């Protein structure tokens, strides 16, 4: 759930970075037509860094030739008067093929006039050089999305002009250095997605200019500090995916500019502060997967800008405050799933709003599927793990913008051959209901170019698998534990994006088509507990998980990877399979 609030955060970071660059001496919107020759010492330092990069597919370093490092070298900006390097900006693309592999050269500490360092090379390893602490002019340090290890140097606390520090997406361990509290000009700290331990140092309470704090996805622990309430400029806090415990301090309700508070997946206890309604700028409140209890504060209704509310997977109990019906006018996303709520039905104030995402899984909702007055605005809906009954009928008809639908583990009874899904739907999960009817009709009617994930397992669906057309983007098809018969069609090889196929616990017979091996993305295959015969095709070499047990398969198991690394249980209870990991084949069995 960490992606929630990222749009606002990204806009904030872009604005901060643009402000820093425009304020940097020698960098202006109107670039000078000519630079003086760069200093020989800076050029030597850059070439030393280049030599520490073993491979570069970004193309940046291939331009680092000749004498003119200021005008012709990509990623380098110089002061227009002195020719000293003030910006080093090397960022690999996000396509997976663009990267720099190597280490950070300690010589980088010799760029004494450097103001901005951004090196995001994906495969840059080793420690952060201590020498970076010598860059006394540095205002921005971005070393994110690399493979840097070791600890965060405490000497970074000497960079007194630093306004932005981002070391996210590395393998940095140890503690958050208390010395960072000396950086009184810091506006942004991002140390997320590392392996940091310990607590949040009290010295960070001195950072009165701090606007953004991201420590997500580490192993940090301890309590959320009370001093957060004194950092009045905070706009963004993300402490998700850590091991923080204790209650949320009341002081956090004193932050007038906070727009995103993201605390998912910790061990927080107690209640949400009753004064949380004081956070008038709050847009995103996400505290899912904690141990929070009590009732949901009625003060949430006073949040005029709140558009994303995620309280899922806690212990919140009834009743829902009546004031929520008139409050939160900006609300677009709500997730109350898996609490101790007994809603009975979807509250009218939810069903009648123009919402994008409604997630009410495990909220003890009963009766027929609800009617949503503004169904065309819905992007995702999750009503799984309730006690919904009756027909699906025209439930999806008006949901023209729907991308994700989860109705699993209810008591819905419908003929799937009559269900028409929205044309843009990418995921449908209706497993563990009482659905029946023809699987062939359902697939023919609904699997087009957008649907990627289908789960109809554990129902009463019958019929045979249809012919599959080309052009589908289907990635996962789970039809296990139904009453499907017939054979596996050869046309299943047209599902070129298929990664997962589970048709176990049905009545499917015939052979496993060898042309399934054409599905180069197929990683998961479960055909167990059917009536399949013949051999296991050698062509299925892309599999990482497979289950062939309880069929009528015969012959030698292919004696190569991946087949010889699957457990014996994956081949058990067949007619006459042999070969590792089962007992060796006899001469007669080898001739089959």
Image (spheres, rainbow, N blue to C red):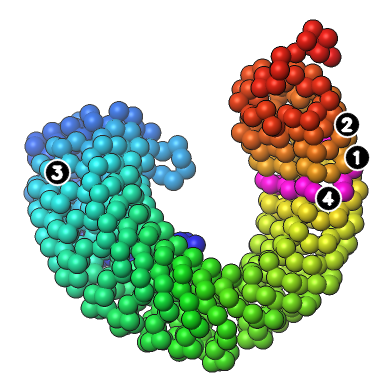
Q: Please, is residue 218 above or below residue 307 in the view?
A: above
Marks 2 and 3, Cα distance to the nearest angstrom?
66 Å
Q: Which residue is mark 3?
A: 130
Q: Position of residue 334 (x, y in %)?
A: 56, 75
Question: Can residue 314 be seen from the camera position used here?
Answer: yes
**Highlighted range, magenta:** 473-490
Q: Which residue is mark 2?
A: 510
Question: Can residue 489 be seen from the camera position used here?
Answer: no
Query: Going by the image, does 507 lie left or right of 184?
Result: right
Q: Are marks 4 and 1 in contact (CB under 8 Å)?
A: no
- Of badges 1 and 3, nearer the viewer stands 1
- Of badges 4 and 1, nearer the viewer stands 4
Marks 1 and 2, Cα distance to the nearest angstrom?
8 Å
Badge 3: few (under 14), some or many (20 or more) residues near its Cα, within 10 Å? some
- What residue sits 45% from the left and 62% below the top? 265
| Disc nearer the start of the sequence (1/2) | 1
Marks 4 and 1, Cα distance to the nearest angstrom?
13 Å
Q: Which residue is mark 4?
A: 482
Which residue occupies the foreground of this view, 133 or 545? Answer: 545
- What residue sits 12% from the left and 39% below the top? 42
Q: Which residue is mark 1?
A: 486
Badge 2: few (under 14), some or many (20 or more) residues near its Cα, within 10 Å? some
Query: Going by the image, does 304 lie left or right of 533?
Result: left
């Amino acid at each position: 759930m960490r992606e929630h609030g990222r749009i606002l955060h990204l806009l904030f970071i872009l604005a901060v970075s643009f402000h820093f660059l425009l304020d940097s001496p020698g960098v202006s919107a109107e670039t000078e037509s000519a630079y003086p020759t760069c200093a020989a010492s800076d050029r030597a330092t850059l070439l030393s860094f280049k030599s520490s990069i073993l491979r570069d597919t970004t193309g940046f370093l291939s331009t680092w030739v000749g004498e003119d490092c200021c005008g012709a070298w990509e990623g380098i900006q110089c002061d227009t008067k002195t020719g000293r390097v003030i910006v080093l900006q090397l960022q690999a693309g996000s396509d997976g093929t663009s990267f720099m592999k190597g280490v950070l050269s300690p010589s980088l500490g010799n760029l004494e006039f450097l103001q901005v360092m951004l090196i995001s090379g994906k495969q840059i390893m080793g420690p952060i050089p201590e020498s970076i602490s010598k860059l006394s002019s540095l205002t921005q340090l971005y070393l994110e999305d690399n493979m840097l290890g070791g600890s965060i140097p405490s000497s970074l606390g000497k960079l007194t002009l630093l306004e932005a520090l981002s070391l996210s997406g590395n393998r940095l361990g140890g503690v958050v250095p208390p010395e960072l509290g000396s950086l009184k000009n810091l506006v942004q700290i991002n140390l997320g997605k590392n392996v940091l331990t310990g607590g949040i140092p009290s010295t960070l309470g001195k950072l009165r200019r701090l606007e953004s704090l991201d420590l997500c996805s580490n192993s940090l622990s301890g309590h959320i500090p009370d001093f957060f309430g004194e950092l009045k400029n905070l706009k963004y806090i993300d402490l998700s995916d850590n091991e923080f415990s204790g209650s949320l301090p009341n002081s956090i309700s004193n932050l007038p500019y906070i727009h995103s508070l993201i605390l998912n997946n910790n061990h927080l206890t107690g209640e949400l502060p009753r004064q949380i309604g004081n956070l008038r700028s709050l847009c995103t409140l996400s505290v899912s997967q904690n141990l929070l209890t009590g009732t949901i504060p009625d003060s949430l209704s006073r949040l005029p800008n709140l558009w994303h509310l995620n309280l899922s997977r806690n212990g919140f109990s009834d009743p829902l405050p009546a004031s929520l019906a008139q409050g939160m006018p900006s609300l677009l996303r709500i997730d109350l799933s898996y609490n101790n709520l007994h809603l009975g039905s979807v509250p009218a104030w939810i069903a009648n709003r123009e919402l994008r995402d409604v997630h009410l899984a495990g909220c003890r909702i009963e009766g027929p599927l609800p009617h949503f007055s503004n169904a065309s605005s819905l992007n995702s809906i999750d009503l799984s793990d309730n006690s919904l009954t009756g027909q699906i009928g025209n439930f999806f008809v008006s949901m023209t913008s729907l991308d994700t639908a989860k109705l699993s583990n209810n008591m819905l009874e419908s003929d799937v051959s009559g269900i028409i899904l929205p044309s843009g739907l990418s995921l449908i999960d209706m497993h563990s209901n009482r659905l029946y009817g023809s699987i062939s009709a359902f697939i023919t009617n609904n699997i087009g170019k957008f649907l990627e994930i289908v789960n109809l397992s554990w129902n009463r669906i019958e019929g045979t698998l249809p012919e599959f057309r080309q052009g589908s983007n289907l990635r996962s098809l789970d039809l296990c534990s139904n009453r499907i018969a017939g054979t596996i069609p050869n046309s299943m090889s047209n599902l070129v994006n298929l990664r997962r196929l589970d048709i176990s616990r049905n009545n499917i017979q015939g052979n496993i088509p060898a042309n399934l091996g054409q599905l180069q993305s197929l990683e998961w295959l479960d055909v167990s507990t059917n009536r399949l015969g013949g051999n296991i095709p050698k062509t299925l070499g892309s599999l990482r998980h497979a289950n062939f047990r309880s069929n009528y398969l015969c012959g030698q198991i292919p004696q190569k990877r991946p087949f010889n690394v699957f457990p014996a249980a994956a081949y058990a209870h067949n007619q006459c399979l042999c070969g590792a990991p089962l007992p060796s084949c006899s001469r007669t069995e080898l001739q089959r």
